[in-house]
Image: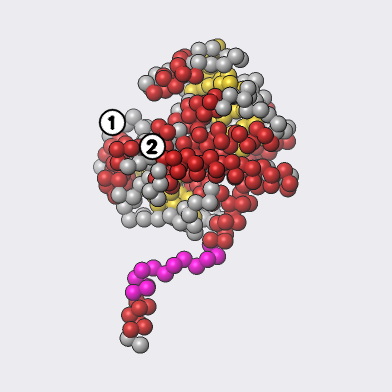
Amino acid sequence: MNEIRYDNLGPTKILQLYDPRIPFHAFVVIDNTARGPALGGVRITPEVNLSEVARLARTMTYKSAAAGLHLGGGKSGIIAAADNPDIESIVRSFARMIARLDDYIPAPDMGSNETMMAWIKDEIGRVAGLPEELGGLPLDKLGATGFGLAACAEIACRHIDLPLAGARVAIQGFGNVGSAAARFLVERGAILVALSDRQGTAFAAGGLNLNAALEAHRRNENMVAAAGGELLPQEAIFGIDCDILVPAATADVIRADNQAQVRARMILEGANIPATIEAEQLLAARGVLVVPDFIANAGGLIMAAAEYYGKTEDEAFEEIRDNLHHNTAEILDLSRKKQVLPRRAAEEIALRRVLDAMRTPPPPHPARLIEQARDRLLG
Ligand SMILES: NC(=O)c1ccc[n+]([C@@H]2O[C@H](COP(=O)([O-])OP(=O)(O)OC[C@H]3O[C@@H](n4cnc5c(N)ncnc54)[C@H](O)[C@@H]3O)[C@@H](O)[C@H]2O)c1
C-alpha cells in the first residue's frame, strides 16, 4: 500500500532511498515544516511502507503543533528487521543518505533505539533521542511517553467521572510505551488487569504482577508469562473487561470489524494511529472516550524536543505533565462543546496553528540576506 494523500498541509517532501550495496529500502516523508524543522521517528520494521510513513508524518505535524512546539512533522521508515545483523550498516547508510535533508531531525521509533541515534549523530550530527552518555535524555528508558499517558489519564478520567485510583487498565504491547504507561498508571492507583504482547494476553481481574513483567521487559524475556494470570490469545486484549484500554503496539489494530469487542470506557492511544477513523466514530457513538494519539502520546516528542533544545530531565518531565494536562482538558472540552470526536477537536486546534504559521512568510535564506546587504552597499 503506497498511496499518498496530498492536501493543504502536505506532504511537502517524499524521499525514497535504496542502497544497493547492503541492500535496503527506506522512505522519508516531510509532511509540513511551517512551524519548524520536522522532528520524527525512524521506524524500522519489515512491513513499514510509504503510506504508513506519510500518515505518521501527518500525525507528527499535528502532534508538534498541538504540543505548541516550534517543530514540523516528518517520519521515516527503513524496511528491515531491527535484529538484522547488518542493522548498523543500514542505519549509518540511511543517515548518510539524509545528510542534506536538513529540515528533518531523526528520532527513535518502533524498531529503532538510542544506540542507533548515536550512529546517526556520528554520521550527520543532526538527531534527537541520544543515549545519556552522549548528553541525551533517554526517553524510552525514562518512560516519557508512558508518563505523558498517565498525565493524560488524570484529566481524561475526570471527564468521564472515573476515579483513576482503582481504574482497571489493559495494555496492548508491553514495549517501551506500554511498560512505562503501566508503571505510571499503577503508581497513580490504577490496577493492571491485562497486558498483551506477541506471546499472547495475560489477564487477572485482581491485578497482574507488574514488577515481574517489567523485569522480563528489561531482560528481553517473555513479559506475558512473567505477568502471571490467565493466558489468553493475543487478540483477547481488546475484549477484556476493563475501564481503560491502552493500545501501545502498532497501527490499525482497532477497526470497524473488531471495535464492538471493546468493553473499556476509555481508550488512551499510546501507539500512533492504533484505531481507524471508522472505529473511533463507532466507539464514540457507543460512549467510549478515545483520546487521540497525537495528544495522548506526545510525551516522547516533548522530551526529544527538550533534549534537542538543551533542557534538563526535570524540565522535560514538567513540560510533559503541564502540556498533557492542558491539552487533554482543552480538546475534551472543545469536543464536548462542539459535539465532535476528540480527534476532530484536536485537529482543529493543531490545524489552526499550522495554517497560521503557513501564512507567515519564512525568513529569507542566508544567501539572499547577503545579496540584499551587498545591493544596499552598492547603492
Ligand atoms: N517510544 C515512544 O516514545 C513513542 C512515542 C509516541 C508513540 N509511540 C508509538 O507507540 C507504539 C509502541 O512504541 P514502542 O516504542 O513502545 O515500541 P516497542 O517496539 O518498544 O514496543 C512495541 C511492543 O508491541 C509488541 N507488539 C507488536 N505487535 C503486537 C500485537 N499485534 N499485539 C501485541 N503486542 C504487539 C511488540 O512485541 C513490542 O513489545 C508505536 O506505535 C510507536 O510509534 C512511541
Q: Secondary structure at mark 1?
A: loop
Name the residue located 49 percent from the left edge and 51 percent from the top edge. 69
The magenta segment: 358-370
Front one among 53 and 230: 230
The location of residue 18, given as percent across then percent down, is 33, 46
Residue at disc 2, secondary structure: loop
Relative side of 80 to 237, left or right: left
Q: Which class describes the residues within 10 Å of circle 2: few (<14), some (14-19), or many (20+)?
A: many
Query: Is 339 colored magenta in this rendering?
Result: no
Q: Amino acid at mark 1?
A: Pro
User: Residue 295 appears in which quarter of the rendering?
Assistant: top right
Residue at 55%, 57% (x, y): give it.
Answer: 354
Identify residue type, mark 2: Pro
Query: Is residue 289 shown above or below 166?
Result: below
Image height of 349 relative to 24, above or below: below
Q: Which residue is mark 1?
A: 85
Q: Residue furthest bottom?
A: 379
Q: Earlier in the sequence, mark 1 or mark 2?
A: 1
Give the residue drawn at x 55%, y 44%.
323
Q: Quadrant of residue 267?
A: top right
**3D distance between C-alphas at marks 1 and 2:** 24 Å
Q: Can you tell which mark lies on residue 138? A: 2
Q: Which percent across, then down, holds residue 250? A: 50, 33
The number of numbered discs placed on residues in the rendered structure image is: 2
